[in-house]
Amino acid sequence: MNKRIIAAIVRKDLRVVRRSRALMTPLIVLPVLLMIVFPTVFTFLPRFVGGASTAFSQMFRNLPDPVKQQFGEFTEATWIRVVHTQMLAPLMLLVPFMVANVIAADGFAGERERKTLEPLLYTPATDAELFFAKLLAAWIPAVMIAFGGAFIYAVIVNVTAWPVMHRVFFPDLTWTVMVLWMAPAFAALGLAGMLLVSLRVRGMQEATQLGGLFVLPVIALVVGEVRGAILLGPVMAVAIGLLVWAIAAALLLFGVKRFKRTSLVSKL
Amino acid sequence: MHRYGATVALRDLSLTVQEGEVFSLLGHNGAGKTTTVRIVNGLLAPASGSVHVFGQSPLTDGASVRRRTAVLTESPTLDERLTARETLAAFAEMYDVPRAEARPRIDALLEEFGIADRARDRVGGFSRGMKQRLSLARALVHDPDLLFLDEPTAGLDPVATHQLHDTVREMARTRGRTVVLCTHNLVEAQALSDRVAVLGGGALLALGTPAELARRITPRLEVTIEIDPARHGDAVALIAGLDGLTVATDRTGVLRVGSIPRERVPDIAARLVAGGIPLYRLEPHEPSLTDAYFALQPRGNGSA
């Protein structure tokens, strides 16, 4: 594989994404919401919103026993730990998923829609180089934003919870595994899903609508966590990450076999 | 042969393009020109038959073939969010142009195509003509040996069209590059091409130099004669004495001899000189490629 050709396509794609307000808006809003606004609001909520503490206490009592045993009695400190290490944690996975999904939609379906795919097909890039470049162009920023966002999230949580916790308590092992292992997997899932959809549709809008369906596993994880159906510990995080990596790899393998110039050109 | 579903896009097409020639593919929309370009560059696989470019198969050695070719597509397919310079720099890298060569080459192309002062502007703000010029600069950024130009002058003003024609001639005549022109512009094809292939319904209808084709399809020509208007009557009488020739004065005041075989042209000149008529101008009009093109196309087969 020619690394220079791959790097050139990645750089071009990222530059194009950076200059699109329509693409950058969700890429900024979602991480800001999930990585900055949510941790801040949920840390302070019991302190400043009347009745919130009672409601959260009720919510805590409804959690399965293993969860309750893990966190002990309900206090403000317990609430902070439950919220950040259990309830909000899976939401963080939406960020790499969505970033990869949106960039991949622009890189595959968007490029076709703008009619800029054809000149790329005429370059010496092989099908594999083209495919790999498109993957990297979506995956690298998704993972970087996830890592950066996770760092900011951790800082915000520790700072805002300091008056209660009096120590750096976050991230814990589960969250670390989620960031380093699951987030890249969900980014891969997001772009793999979009790749498969983009190979079949012609337009960006169609691609984003169908590709968004691949977010369902993340939603299921969030709901499972909130309802206590899934107790996300380090082992569970590794297992789920492995499963997502396997699904993403299978989808990408399926996609790479269909990512041929001769097929792509028929949809120009 | 190549098919799109049940539609046969190309059939029985056999062509060889020589190094250093300007070769035109002519045909109506859907004649198979773009399909041919895509097959030659390895973007499509022929259903049957084989293609060789620089001795290599575009299907198995596609990357190697495309490294030496370039395609200017019919509509400017530029990313509007990139600047002109970024566009050329990105494609220079994709074609693996050495870094030391890329920068001066990009500067030269921007200058040559009149985009230097807009090099840092995003392509989205460019006029259609500027986009077309930038597309051509992009196609030339790796100094290709074989250049495909699909409707290259569509949207260009006369000055830019003239410049593009000069570029094509310079590439072929001075630098020995090969240019394949896909065009509906028959005048352009006649002016630039060493040889042309006329396609229709995916098949090769005719192949040869523009003059050969024109003569083959329409072997007769017209002759314009300019003499002293006072001697028109004498001249008409003399020419009418030649078997089968008809002559008339046209609205510009010159004599026009109707469709005649080319071997009769010297007879006309000899008869007038022998008759003591001073001859200011005697000009045979070669049939044009346009005449030949329309004669070749089946009736009702779209429009050029």
Image (cartoon, coloured by chain):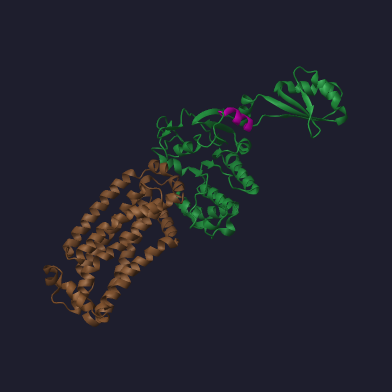
Q: Position of residue A244 (x, y in %)?
A: 24, 55
Number of numbered discs overlaid on the protein picture: 0
* One can see residue B21 in this view: no
| Chain the render paints brown | A
Is A120 covered by the magenta stretch? no
| Chain the render paints green | B
* One can see residue A195 in this view: yes
Q: For the view shown, which residue lies furthest in the bottom direction?
A: A163
Q: Is residue B133 left or right of residue A205?
A: right
Q: Is residue B222 left or right of residue A119?
A: right
Q: Nearer the viewer, residue B233 or B64?
A: B233
Q: Nearer the viewer, residue B224 or A62?
A: A62
Identify whether B228 is placed above or below A12.
above
Identify whether B100 is placed above or below B251.
below
Is B292 covered by the magenta stretch? yes
Task: Read off the magenta span.
Answer: B289-298
Q: For the view shown, which residue lies furthest in the top direction?
A: B243
